[in-house]
Amino acid sequence: MPVYDQRTITTFATRTMAQNPIIQIIDLHTRYGGKEILKGITLDLYANETFVILGRSGCGKSTLLRHLVGLETPTAGHILIKGVDMASAAEAERNRVLRKVGMLFQGAALFNSMTVAENVGLPLQEHTPLEPSTVKIMTRLKLDLVGLSGYDDFMPAQLSGGMKKRAALARALAMDPDILFCDEPSAGLDPIVAAGIDHLILKLHKAFKMTIVVVTHELASVFLIADRVALLHEGSVVFCGTLAELKRSEHPYVRQFLERRPDEQVPDSETYLKSLVG
Amino acid sequence: MRPWAEIAGGLGRGFFTLIGGLGRMGRFTQATLRSMLIEPWRGRTLRWGAAFEQMVLIGVASLPIVVTISFIVGLIIAMQSAYQLQRFGAVIFVADLVAVSVTRELAPLMTAILVAGRSGSAIAAEIGSMKVAEELDALNAMALHPIRFLVVPRTLAMMIVLPCLTVIADLLGIFGGLVLGVVSLDISWIAYFNQTADALLLKDFVSGLIKSFFFAVIIALVGAFEGFHVAGGAEGVGKATTTAVVRSIFLIILADMVFTALFYSTF
């Protein structure tokens, strides 16, 4: 495993700045207990692109996203967001970066004890010196943006799955982030509502030119929203490129994923019988 | 493996689990105290609005049960003391016994145990549910520190409300003794009141309040700590709630012993 010193990281950071990059993942390793979840991920994400991290369940894609927002500390490697190393930065520096980052959680993660408007207004109320009346107006603007006008005083429990995701998206957009992370935005939603969320992400990308990083396993979403795609398999990146390159790729795992083929199970009666006996 | 080796192994594992748990609790307490005492001096305001909401939830809502239980405890202590003191023809000293035992010991202890069962468990359940629903992660992702955001207001509220409830419990406990004295022991209420006033010293009252202040810290921190360490969905929340109550009551009684010994030797 390569060890990167501070100089190398600075070089990485300088190079990416020249190319207008925003996030750099450098040789990221993560281990839970004895199991290695991420095995040396290296990726560059550029400003204003929609980058999709694709992979089957349990491949480490959500773990990777949790590292990007600083919810997990890597065992080894670095994540630079706007040149700031999220793992080693001081809390104030990390918070400064996070204030311009939005995160849409898989389960929406709205605060159940607060109304929709309080949820959306919370980051503004806590991080800005804005008057409550201004926060209210800003909150309404964000709710209009996601198609939830008039739901200010609803509690999260009163919303449907799709509406919860929209409200969570409004909250993620509250601070006008430069980067928006979305964890499985269409998980648990019916195809029509899921398509609505995808189109909303597209609309936001066009309107605000923000960098959007989406983790998903839904191919339909990928083909609709992605500029570039990274395909993860067992904690490693097996493919990274544009949509066109993804479609052309001859990598066996990429083909299997795109063609939705199940894992080949070679029927070996002797091994099977042995496994039963233990 | 031999049985003794298994026992030794189990004891060793238990010891290291205990040390690990104490270490985590220590770090959690340190982070809370830092957010409560140091960060306000660095320009981060305390969330007094949220603390006030918690004061209402913890204090006002606990009032009926604290009032009722303290009154009953006052009655019980008066009855138990009268049973002994009648033999010596000294029933008037029931007032002394009730006043001193309620203010020094029973009011702070009973109030803390009631609030631990009622509000300590609620803190663990609320924060635990938030953990399960990724709400704590959402706070972190929004650069809002969950300890500053959730634990500090609850701890502040508890530190203010529990001593207030203890004062009320003191008064109701003494009132319970007075009711028994007047109704059952033929003591006039003026005589009972005067006897109580003579018996009670400021240090009795203050030592009970000092205890309740520390009990408050225990209830809030143990409840929040268990909530933060919930694992495994709704079942985990249930376990954390039970653990929070059991551990906080254990620590309250342990702290009570330490403080009582301290006050006994110094006052």
Image: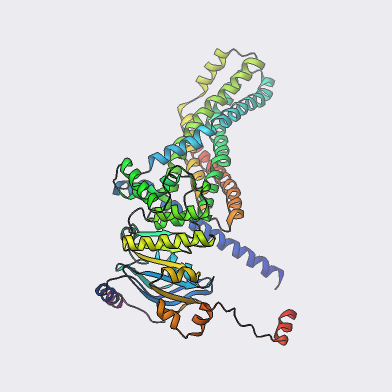
Specify whether B68 is left or right of B156. right
Instruction: Point out the residue furthest to the front here.
Output: A192
Which sits in the foreground, B38 or B77? B38
Residue A7 visible somewhere in the drawing: yes
Identify the residue at image location x=37%, y=61%. A203
Q: Nearer the viewer, residue A108 or B42?
A: A108
Q: What stretch is highlighted in magenta?
A: A1-11
Q: Quadrant of residue A201?
A: bottom left
Does residue B266 appear anywhere in the picture?
A: no
Q: Which residue is drawn at 39% across and 63% down?
A: A202
Point out residue A169 in the picture as x, y percentages from the top left corner: 42, 56
On the picture, is B33 further left or further right than B109?
left
Res B51 quadrant in image = top left
Relative placement, left or right, of A263 versus A258 is right
Where residue B190 appears, as percent x and y from the top left, is: 55, 13
Q: Is residue A250 above or below residue A225?
A: below
Residue at image x 71%, y 81%? Answer: A275
In the rendered image, the quadrant that contains the N terminus of chain B is: bottom right
Position of residue B72 measured from the top left corner of the image (x, y, whole percent): 62, 27
